[in-house]
Image (cartoon, rainbow, N blue to C red):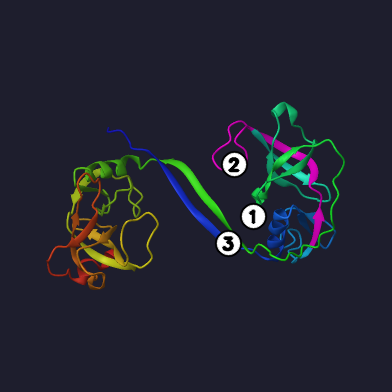
Amino acid sequence: MPEVLKAPLVVEFPFTRSLGPVQSAFLTGLRERVVLGVRTGDGRTLVPPVEYDPVTAEEIRDLIEVAPTGTVTTWAWNHAPRRGQPLTTPFAWALVRLDGADTALLHALDAPGPDTVHTGMRVRIRWAEERTGAITDIACFEPYDGNRAGTTGHTGEFADPVTGIVAAARLDYTYSPGRAQTAYINALSGRRTVGERCPACRKVYVPPRGACPTCGVATSEQVEVGPRGTVTTFCIVNIKAKNLDIEVPYVYAHIALDGADLALHGRIGGIPYDEVRMGLRVEPVWTEGARYPDHYRPTGEPDADYDTYKELL
């Protein structure tokens, strides 16, 4: 059996969100070196603050300042910090209940080693030198042997509040397409498209999945399909994607290759975007050294009859 493929894959995007009045005050406060919590109807102070009481679900807006000092309630040592974490040297992840708060805040604790960290130890905030209104304005916590720090009695009103944040979301993992799609990818390197036929319903799936999604039985019989196919449906893309060297507008379509019972995705080229239509007959266009078609172009054949592809919409 040929070796099953695997490759590192990264999914990364900026996540933009607006802030309500409570989160806005909390993050703006961090920018100003002030830690704000929110007080519930029964007198508990929640840090980080939330907009609704987790017990009663009532809306809460009563902001109250807490101290930048606190106590570790639990912790775990991080021997190997990863990219983007608060510190580049080994540190502890700690839940810290700040003085004046009834809940704990999760952040990094800068300590010489795991033997110097313990539940109940006193810590204080180390502020970042440059602060923008984000949780990273707290650079980390650090050991502290002094008394509870004082507060200013801040009300949570700021002249220039933070109203939104952009958080980078990233997922690093190793992807393996499995036996069936490994064979499909290897066939593409030879400019062939190979699917697998279900032994029960006899449908040919491209790309193959290793099992029939309708019958639930394993598939292994390989069937070469295409290379030509039919556009079953499509969309016109008007927003240019980052790092994608394709001018908009362009057309992305579902294409049912001849002999396949499942439509695959592909870009349509060689024709004005406003002339692409359902039933258009197309063929793949390969570029030198590519492992998959760059796009599909019209073959010049008459359009396929709707009845020949309606079950693949």
Q: In which quarter of the image is the N terminus?
A: top left
Q: Is residue 51 visible?
A: no
Residue under circle 3? 17
Looking at the rendering, the stretch of residues picked out in magenta corresponds to: 63-90
Q: Quadrant of the C terminus?
A: bottom left
Q: Is residue 26 magenta?
A: no
> 45 or 14, which lies in front?
14
Dot placed on the residue nearer the N-terminal end, 3 or 2 = 3
Query: Measured from the top left, where is residue 292 in percent x and y?
Result: 25, 49
Residue under circle 2? 85
At label 3, the amino acid type is Arg
Q: Could you tell me if the residues under marks 3 and 2 are in contact, i.e. CB atoms within 8 Å?
A: no
Dot placed on the residue nearer the N-terminal end, 2 or 1 = 2
* The quadrant where residue 64 appears: bottom right
Q: Is residue 118 visible?
A: yes
At label 2, the amino acid type is Gln
The alpha-carbon separation of the residues under discs 3 and 2 comes to 21 Å
Residue at the limit of the structure toward the front, as seen here: 129
Q: Which numbered disc, 1 or 3, marks the residue closer to the eye?
A: 1
Residue at the limit of the structure toward the left, as seen here: 301
Horizontal side of residue 83 vs 9, given as left or right: right
Q: Residue drawn 74% across and 52% down?
A: 33
Q: Residue drawn 72% across and 61% down?
A: 25
The alpha-carbon separation of the residues under discs 2 and 1 comes to 17 Å
Residue under circle 1? 132
> 150 or 103, which lies in front?
150
Query: Measured from the top left, where is residue 184 in percent x and y?
Result: 26, 45
